[in-house]
Structures are given as structure tokens and as C-alpha cells.
Image: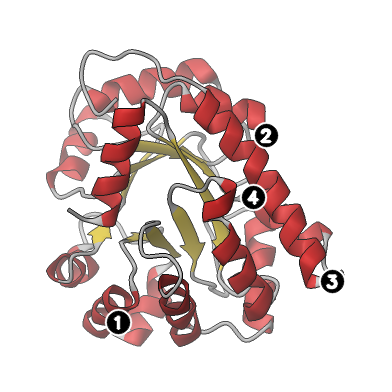
Amino acid sequence: MSRLAAKFAELKKEGRSAFIPFISAGDPNMEICAAILDALPGCGADIIELGMPFSDPMADGPAVQMSSTRAIAAGATMPRVIELVRKFRKKDNKTPIVLMGYFNPIHAYGTAKFARDVAAAGVDGLIAVDLPIEEDEVLRLPAAAQGVDLVRFVTPTTDAARLGRILEAASGYLYYVSVAGVTGTKSFTEADVAAAIARVRAATTLPVAVGFGIKTPEQAATIARLADGVVVGSAIVTKIAETLGQNPEVVVKAVTDLCTSLAQATHAARPAKVETGFA
């Protein structure tokens, strides 16, 4: 059983949702990022989404865009991102890591080589934000051959026919985008998210994680009652931005304090009863 499958099975048994923090690899620099990454499981992170910095992150709002810019300025490259995961795995062989980013750097690296290298480093899943399902076999197939899941998106505009096509080769979990638009700029409505998750769960047993627009413990708790995973990114990278220039210990503590409060809210919320699906 993969780390992702084992984690969601564990969470199902415990009757709670996953807290899934996002940080950009190399933000604000490689050393502090590594310290944050190492600390996240102790804060309650069940799965970690690690951003692959890119110069044109068009699906992201200003906060995540700036985190990517800081990481690149600090020397983040794809080999260094992979090495970051490799070093993390020497200390933690249980917490799933999902690399999230854009296809251009993966294409430049070479998809087959990328799949082999990330699998060897201990990556469990990939999210390619700008790679449509009609074309994702260029990454999905070599990743699957290495035992790495390619996580697919479902959005508020996904109709029944499109959902069926998404589910045909989906694996790991589904990432439901709670609002139309870029990350960190809008908020969700509980009723809309609940209806969307119910529709997805009627069609699949894959876990459903929700991201975009979740910034506070209260919002995390709301989503945790509805979904199998709660993804928080913009609020975390904003906290990093607010502590720039301070001692590394201050930066790490600010991030871990925020993540602890988000994890506690996520874990305390009990999921809604559903007739079908994962939960």
C-alpha cells in the first residue's frame, strides 16, 4: 500500500480529515524551508504539498506567486527540490509528500527521468496544475510506472461528463478547487462545496481534498466536516513573507504555530455522514 493510500485509510479509521499544508520548496531559502518541512508532521500535517517553484505560476494568487519568486531567487532548482525530499525521507518515511507545480519545469527535466528521480527520493504524488487530462499521460504513465500518483483537479465548473473523464484515470486523491480563480484571492461557500463533494463522492471512492480559499482554523474546520482533506497554502506562505529577515527560528515557529492551529481545527471537526464515497 502506498503512503497516500495508507494515510487516507488511517484517517478513515479515525474518522477525521487530513490536514494538508502547502509550502514552496526553497521559500524563503533552502535551509529554512528544510527546517519547516521537517517540522510540519509534528504540527499535525498528514500529507504535505511541496510546491515546485516556477517563474510563471499563472494559477496562483500573489501570495503563492511571491513564494515561488523568493524560492527561485534563493537558488531553488528542480534537482534541489528533489534533494529536499530525499533529505526529509531520511527522517520521516511515513508522511506522504505531493509535489505541486507546473509542467514546463517537468518537461525541461524530462518526464521519464523526473518520474524516476522523484520516486527514488520518496515522492508519493504529483499535481501538474496546467496539464489537462487529455494530455497528462505524458506524465501520468511514467509516474504510475514508478508508483507515483498523478492527482487530478475537479472544479466548480466540472460537469457530469467531464467528471467521468477525470475519474477514468484518477489516482491518489482528487483535489477539489473550492472557488473559480487563482489561489488565495476568494473564499468558498459551504453549501456549494458540500454539494460539489456529494456529487463527486457519488461517482468515486477516491478521497476528496479541498483547496483554494481556506485561510483560517474556522474555515479549515468547516471543510474538514465535508471533505477528506483540507489544503492550506496562501495563509502559510503569507506567514513566511511576514517573517522575512528574522532569525530562522522565528520563521519556523511562526509557520508551525499557524499550522498547529489549522491542524487542530481540522482534526477536531467530525466529517459529515455520507452514504457513498470515502468517508
Quick check: can you spot residue 165? yes
Q: Residue at x 75, y 57 (%)?
A: 253
What is the spatial separation of the Cα atoms under label 3 and label 2, in whole angstroms?
Answer: 25 Å
| N-term mark: 2 or 1 | 1
Q: Residue at x 67, y 34 (%)?
A: 216
**Disc 4 marks which residue?**
234
Q: Residue at x 46, y 70 (%)?
A: 91
What is the spatial separation of the Cα atoms under label 4 and label 1, in whole angstroms?
Answer: 28 Å
**Disc 1 marks which residue?**
117
What is the spatial separation of the Cα atoms under label 2 and label 4, in whole angstroms?
Answer: 11 Å
List x then y, in percent, for residue 250.
81, 62
The answer to whether the residues at label 3 and label 2 have Cβ atoms under 8 Å apart is: no
> Looking at numbered disc 3 in the image, what kind of residue is underneath it?
Asn
| N-term mark: 1 or 3 | 1
> Looking at numbered disc 1 in the image, what kind of residue is underneath it?
Asp
**Disc 3 marks which residue?**
247
List x then y, in percent, for residue 127.
37, 58
Q: Secondary structure at mark 3?
A: loop
Front of the two marks 4 and 1:
1
Front of the two marks 4 and 3:
3
Q: Secondary structure at mark 2?
A: loop
The answer to whether the residues at label 1 and label 3 have Cβ atoms under 8 Å apart is: no
The answer to whether the residues at label 2 and label 1 have Cβ atoms under 8 Å apart is: no
- 136 is higher (above) or lower (below) than 17: below
**Disc 2 marks which residue?**
216
Q: Secondary structure at mark 4?
A: helix
| N-term mark: 3 or 2 | 2
What is the spatial separation of the Cα atoms under label 4 and label 3, in whole angstroms?
Answer: 22 Å
List x then y, in percent, for residue 44.
54, 45
Q: Which mark is residue 207?
A: none
